[in-house]
C-alpha cells in the first residue's frame, strides 16, 4: 500500500527495546504535558499498558465536552456549537493517532488482544457522539440558519462538513435504526481487527527454505538477504525467502527454478485462503453483509454508493466509467506484452503454458532484450541514503524547505527523525522515517502523522509526520540498495508527508480531503523521481561516487512504458473487484473467490496470466485499511497528478518555483478547506484533462497535426482522447480519510 493516513487500521504495537528511559511505575505519559523536543510524542516513556487508560480518559473527557455543548441553555450559535465541537476530543484524538501509527509499524500477541478489546469500544464511543440527538439538534439549528450567520468561506465549509458528517453517520435515523447501526459498527471494527491479524500471521508464517543449489539466477543482493534471514531464524547455511516484497519480487524476477517461483507465488496468492484458522473468507462475508445493511439503513442501495457519494467522483457510474475506459486498452496492451514473453517462454518450455508466476521472470528477460537494461545494474546508483537525499533536494528546489537530523525519542531503534525548516528557517514540522520490514510491521508503505497540525490560542501547532516502508535491507556489508519501485515509492510517500507538513488549516474539521483527492500530492511527486535532472542530483554509485551515466538514464527513459499494460491491468482489476463486491445490493452468502473469478475473468476477460494486484482474502486496503469501495482512488488521483505535472512541463521548467508555490498555497496548505475540485481548478485554471494520464500509461495515441514533418506518436495502446468529466463537480462534501 502506498498511502495510509488516518485510514490506518488501528493495530497496536510497541517494543521499545533500546529507546527506554527510567520511569516511575504507573506513570502515564498521556496524562502530562510532553516535555519533548519539537513536541514529538515521548516514545521513550510510552508503554503498551498506557493506551487503554489513556483512551478511557480521553473518551470520558470527550463526553464531558459534548455534555457541555448539549446542556448549554444559550441559543445555538456557530461558536458555542460548531467551534466547540471542533475543539472537543483532542486528548482522545492524540492518543488514537499514536495508537494507530504504532500499531501498523509493530505488533505483538499481547497488543493484538488489547486491540480486540479497544476497537469495539472506540466504535461505540464514536457512535455515541455522532448519534447524540441533542447534539445533532443544536448542530442542525445552526445549519438551518447558515445563510443569516455572516460566516466566512472556511466557517461555512466547517459547518457544512460537520452537519453532513453527522447525517452520514446516521443522525437522522430513528432510535431502533440507530441501535442497529451501533451494533453493526462495533461488529465491523472487530472484524477488521481479525482480518488484519490473520494477514499479519500469514505474511510472517511462510518461509521458503532453500540450499545454495536452488539459487540459480538470484542476484547477490537477494542471496545475501536470504542468507541473513536464514541465519536470523537459526538456519545457518540455508537461504530463506519470504512473502515480503523485498524478498518475493527478486525471487519471482530472477529465479530460473520455475517450480519454486510457482510455489512462492501461490503461497502469496493464497494468503488467508487456506481453510485454516487464518482464513478470511468468512470475514469477507461478514464485511459485505454488515456494510450492505449499513448502507441500506442510511438510504443507499449499496455500500459503494454510500462511500462514493462523499467523494469527488460522486457516483459509482463515474467510477466505473473511468475504470472501464482504462481497462480495455490496458488489457490489450498486456496481451501484447504477453505475446512477446511467450516467444521466450516457448524456448524454455515448448509444451508448457505461460502462468502468472512466469510474468516477472520473462518480463525481465524482455527488458534486457529490448532495452539492454537490467534493474540490478541500476541498484548501485539507488542507495537509500542517496534516494532520501534526492527527495530532500527536490523539496528544496521546489519549495525552499530544508531538513536537519535531530535527536528525539524514537518509537523503534531503526527510525530516524528530521526537523523540517521552512523557507525562512522557521520550524515547519518533524518527519520520521522507518524503512525496513520486520515481523511486527504491516506490509506496504504509508505516511501518517503522530501529531496533527492545529491551532492553539492562535498559534500553529506543527505536525509530527512519519513515513513507513518495507524496503530492501542492507545486506552483505553494502548499504540498502533500492529497486526502481522502492525508489518511486519513497517519492510517493514523501509527497504525502509534504501534504501533512504544509497543512495550515484553522479548524480541525477541515484537515481532511476527499479520498480520491488524497493521492494527488503523493503521485505528483513520482513524476520527478526519474527525471534526468533529478537523477543527476541523487543517483550516485555507492562505491565509486559516479553519477549515473547518461546511457543508463537514456535506457531508463526509453523503457518508461515497459510492462505498463500489466501494471495498469492488475491495478484496475483490483479496483473493479473492490467496486463490484461493495456494489452488492442484497447480501447472500457467497464464495469470494468465485465472485472474483466471475467479476474479472468471466465478465471482463482478465487473462489467467495476470492476477489482480490484491485478491480478496488479503485485500487489506478495502477490508481493514479504510479504502472500501475506494481502491479506485489511486486511478482517479492519477488523472489529477498527471495533469498537474503538465503545468510544470508547459512552463518549460520542471522546478518552476511559482507553480510549486501555487500548488503549496492552493492545495497542500488548505487541507479540506474547500472541495477538491474547486481547489484543483483554482490551482490549474481549468478542469483536469485525462489525456496526460493515458499517455503516461502508454494507452493513448495522439496523432500529430497533418502536414510536412508530421511524426507518429503511437504507443502501445489505443486512442482515448477527450477530457475527463468529474461529475458531480463543485459538490460540497464531508470527507472520509
Image (spheres, helix red, strand yellow):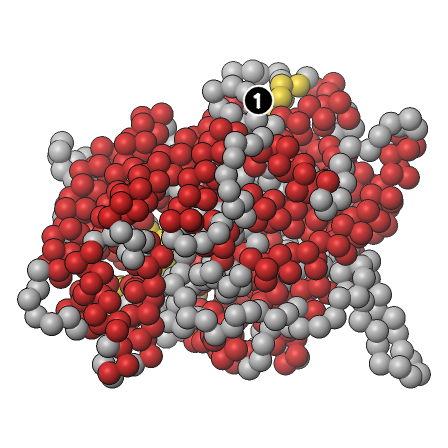
Residue at left offset 71%, top offset 63%: 694
Q: Which residue is mark 1?
A: 274
Q: Say whether residue 253 is visible.
A: yes
Please state which of residues 264 and 661 is positioned toward the viewer in this rendering: 264
Please identify the quadrant where the C terminus is shown.
bottom left
Q: Relative to 201, is 366 on the left or the right?
A: right
Residue at left offset 52%, top offset 35%: 588
Answer above or below: position of 75 versus 206: below
Residue at left offset 61%, top offset 71%: 725
Please state which of residues 236 and 645 is positioned toward the viewer in this rendering: 645
Residue 85 x/y as whole percent: 21, 62
Residue 338 x/y as whole percent: 82, 43
Answer above or below: position of 711 versus 274: below
Residue at left offset 18%, top offset 65%: 138
Which corner quadrant of the image does residue 479 belong to?
Answer: top right
Q: Say whether residue 42 is visible.
A: no
Amino acid at each position: 500500500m502506498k498511502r495510509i493516513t488516518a485510514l490506518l487500521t488501528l493495530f497496536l504495537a510497541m517494543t521499545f527495546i533500546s529507546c527506554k528511559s527510567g520511569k516511575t511505575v504507573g506513570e502515564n505519559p498521556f496524562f502530562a504535558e510532553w516535555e519533548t523536543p519539537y513536541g514529538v510524542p515521548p516514545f521513550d516513556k510510552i508503554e503498551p499498558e498506557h493506551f487503554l487508560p489513556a483512551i478511557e480518559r480521553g473518551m470520558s473527557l470527550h463526553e464531558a465536552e459534548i455534555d457541555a455543548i448539549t446542556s448549554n441553555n444559550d441559543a445555538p450559535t456557530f461558536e458555542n456549537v460548531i467551534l466547540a465541537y471542533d475543539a472537543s476530543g483532542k486528548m482522545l484524538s492524540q492518543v488514537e493517532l499514536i495508537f494507530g501509527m504504532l500499531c501498523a509499524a509493530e505488533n505483538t500477541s499481547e497488543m493484538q488482544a488489547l486491540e480486540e478489546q479497544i476497537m469495539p469500544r472506540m466504535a461505540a464511543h464514536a457512535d455515541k457522539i455522532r448519534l447524540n440527538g441533542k447534539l445533532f439538534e443544536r448542530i442542525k439549528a445552526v445549519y438551518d440558519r447558515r445563510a443569516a450567520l455572516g460566516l466566512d468561506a472556511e466557517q461555512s465549509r466547517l459547518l457544512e462538513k460537520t452537519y453532513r458528517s453527522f447525517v452520514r453517520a446516521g443522525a437522522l435515523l430513528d432510535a431502533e435504526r440507530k441501535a442497529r447501526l451501533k451494533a453493526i459498527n462495533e461488529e465491523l471494527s472487530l472484524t477488521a481487527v481479525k482480518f488484519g491479524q490473520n494477514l499479519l500471521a500469514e505474511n510472517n508464517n511462510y518461509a521458503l527454505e532453500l540450499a545454495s543449489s536452488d539459487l540459480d539466477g538470484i542476484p547477490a543482493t537477494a542471496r545475501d538477504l536470504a542468507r541473513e534471514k536464514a541465519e536470523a531464524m537459526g538456519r545457518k547455511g540455508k537461504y530463506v525467502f519470504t512473502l515480503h516484497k523485498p524478498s518475493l519480487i527478486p525471487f519471482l524476477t530472477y529465479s530460473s527454478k520455475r517450480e519454486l517461483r510457482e510455489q512462492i507465488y501461490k503461497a502469496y496468492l493464497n494468503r488467508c485462503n487456506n481453510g485454516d484458522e487464518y482464513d478470511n473468507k468468512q470475514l469477507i462475508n461478514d464485511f459485505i453483509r454488515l456494510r450492505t445493511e449499513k448502507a441500506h439503513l442510511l438510504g443507499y442501495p449499496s455500500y459503494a454508493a454510500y462511500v462514493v457519494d462523499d467523494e469527488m467522483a460522486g457516483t459509482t457510474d463515474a467510477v466505473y466509467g473511468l475504470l472501464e475506459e482504462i481497462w480495455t486498452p490496458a488489457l490489450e496492451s498486456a496481451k501484447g506484452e504477453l505475446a512477446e514473453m511467450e516467444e521466450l517462454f516457448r524456448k524454455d518450455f515448448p509444451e508448457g503454458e505461460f502462468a502468472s508466476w512466469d510474468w516477472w521472470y520473462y518480463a525481465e528477460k524482455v527488458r534486457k532484450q529490448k532495452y539492454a537494461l537490467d534493474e540490478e545494474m541500476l541498484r548501485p546508483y539507488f542507495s537509500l541514503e542517496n534516494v532520501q537525499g534526492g527527495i530532500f533536494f527536490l523539496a528544496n528546489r521546489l519549495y525552499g524547505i530544508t531538513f536537519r537530523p535531530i535527536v528525539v525519542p524514537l518509537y523503534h531503534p531503526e527510525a530516524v527523525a528530521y526537523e523540517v525548516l521552512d523557507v525562512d528557517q522557521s520550524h515547519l514540522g518533524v518527519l520520521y522515517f522507518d524503512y525496513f520490514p520486520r515481523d511486527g510491521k504491516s506490509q506496504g508503505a504509508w505516511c501518517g502523522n503522530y501529531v496533527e497540525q492545529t491551532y492553539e490560542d492562535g498559534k500553529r501547532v506543527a505536525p509530527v509526520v512519519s513515513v513507513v516502508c518495507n524496503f530492501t535491507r542492507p545486506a552483505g556489508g553494502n548499504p540498502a540498495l533500492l529497486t526502481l519501485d522502492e525508489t518511486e515509492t519513497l517519492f510517493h510517500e514523501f509527497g504525502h508527508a509534504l501534504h501533512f507538513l504544509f497543512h495550515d488549516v484553522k479548524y480541525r474539521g477541515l484537515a481532511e480531503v476527499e479520498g480520491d483527492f488524497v493521492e494527488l500530492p503523493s503521485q505528483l511527486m513520482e513524476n520527478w523521481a526519474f527525471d534526468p535532472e533529478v537523477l543527476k542530483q541523487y543517483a550516485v554509485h555507492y562505491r565509486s561516487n559516479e553519477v549515473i551515466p547518461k546511457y543508463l538514464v537514456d535506457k531508463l527513459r526509453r523503457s518508461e512504458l515497459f510492462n505498463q499494460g500489466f501494471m495498469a491491468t492488475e491495478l484496475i482489476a483490483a479496483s473493479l473487484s473492490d467496486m463490484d463486491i461493495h456494489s452488492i445490493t442484497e447480501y447472500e452468502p457467497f464464495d469470494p473467490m468465485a465472485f472474483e473469478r466471475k467479476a474479472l475473468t468471466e465478465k471482463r476477460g482478465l487473462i489467467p496470466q495476470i492476477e489482480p494486484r490484491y485478491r480478496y482474502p488479503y485485500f487489506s486496503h478495502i477490508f481493514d485499511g479504510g479504502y472500501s469501495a475506494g481502491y479506485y482512488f489511486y486511478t482517479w488521483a492519477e488523472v489529477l497528478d498527471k495533469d498537474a505535472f503538465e503545468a510544470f512541463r508547459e512552463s518549460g521548467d520542471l522546478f518552476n518555483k511559482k507553480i510549486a508555490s501555487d500548488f503549496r498555497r492552493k492545495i497542500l496548505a488548505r487541507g479540506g478547506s474547500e472541495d477538491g475540485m474547486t481547489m484543483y481548478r483554482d490551482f490549474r485554471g481549468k478542469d483536469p484533462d485525462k489525456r496526460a494520464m493515458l499517455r503516461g500509461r502508454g494507452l493513448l495515441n495522439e496523432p500529430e497535426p497533418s502536414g510536412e514533418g508530421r511524426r507518429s506518436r503511437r504507443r502501445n495502446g489505443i486512442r482515448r482522447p477527450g477530457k475527463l468529466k468529474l461529475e458531480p463537480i463543485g459538490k460540497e462534501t464531508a470527507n472520509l480519510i
